[in-house]
């Protein structure tokens, strides 16, 4: 099993990277928030890795922070939550925000994640409530407030994924209302990319 990789970022795409470690290029799926932080290819990167073995494939999931890896492993233990849904959750909220949502019994926060309905969201809140400590963060940790430059950060993140200027403007316009409400980059980026890919 692969648990950690360090190497040069060879390719960078939405939710997927290729990391060159030694002479081997490893393809990993990452949360959108981590992709945004990587910004450009051809740089040294360290990733915490979960190796997911299926009958037909071995899939690697990478995370810049160890607490995100912990959260991912706990999420996939929940009935009905596979790696794809867990990755979508961590693309929409940070581990800190995940703690906040569960501690506040806020099922609505999970409904905002693509692929999660109301019943699944309610089950997530119930089943995660007793597992908060295992992620390694206190349940009452404060959610950081969005920075004033969140729109600029969003523009930079989308542009660095290779989208043209007009596409970037359209994506930002699509999430402008959420930005005005003070939503963070972790919320805005997935919504903007959904607009660009047509997956509303």
Image (spheres, rainbow, N blue to C red):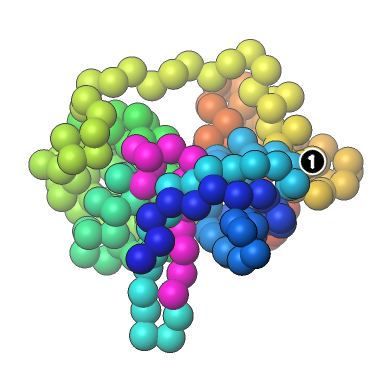
Residue at (61%, 36%) from the top-left corner? 37
Rendered view: 91 above or below 17: above
Q: Residue at x 35, y 30 (%)?
A: 96
Q: Secondary structure at mark 1?
A: helix
* Residue visible at 29% across and 53% down in the picture: 73
Taking 200 as reference, is 68 above or below it?
A: above
Query: Pointer 1: residues within 10 angstroms few (<14), some, or many (20+)?
Result: some
Does residue 61 belong to the magenta stretch? yes
Residue 171 rendering spot, x and y as whole percentages: 74, 42
Residue farthest to the bottom? 56
Occupied quadrant, residue 152: top right
Q: From the viewer's perspective, tell me whether residue 124 is left or right of residue 45.
A: left
Left or right placement of residue 143 versus residue 9 in this view = left
Residue marked by disc 1 = 159
The quadrant of the rendering that contains the N terminus is: bottom left
Check residue 157 for magenta coloring: no
Residue drawn at x 59%, y 57% as measured from the top left: 21
Q: Which residues are magenta?
A: 58-69
């Amino acid at each position: 099993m692969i648990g950690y990789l360090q190497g040069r970022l060879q390719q960078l795409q939405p939710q997927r990277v290729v990391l060159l470690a030694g002479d081997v290029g490893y393809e990993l799926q990452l949360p959108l928030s981590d992709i945004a932080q990587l910004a450009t290819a051809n740089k040294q990167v360290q990733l915490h890795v979960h190796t997911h073995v299926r009958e037909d494939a071995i899939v690697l999931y990478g995370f810049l922070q160890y607490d995100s890896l912990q959260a991912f492993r706990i999420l996939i233990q929940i009935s009905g939550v596979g790696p794809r849904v867990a990755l979508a959750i961590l693309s929409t909220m940070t581990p800190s925000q995940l703690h906040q949502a569960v501690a506040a019994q806020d099922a609505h926060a999970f409904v905002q994640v693509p692929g999660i309905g109301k019943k699944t969201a309610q089950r997530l809140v119930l089943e995660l409530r007793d597992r908060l400590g295992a992620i390694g963060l206190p349940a009452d940790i404060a959610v950081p407030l969005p920075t004033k430059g969140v729109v600029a950060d969003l523009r930079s993140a989308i542009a660095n994924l290779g989208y043209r200027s007009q596409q970037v403007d359209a994506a930002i316009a699509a999430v402008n209302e959420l930005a005005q409400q003070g939503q963070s980059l972790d919320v805005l980026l997935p919504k903007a990319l959904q607009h660009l890919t047509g997956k509303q």
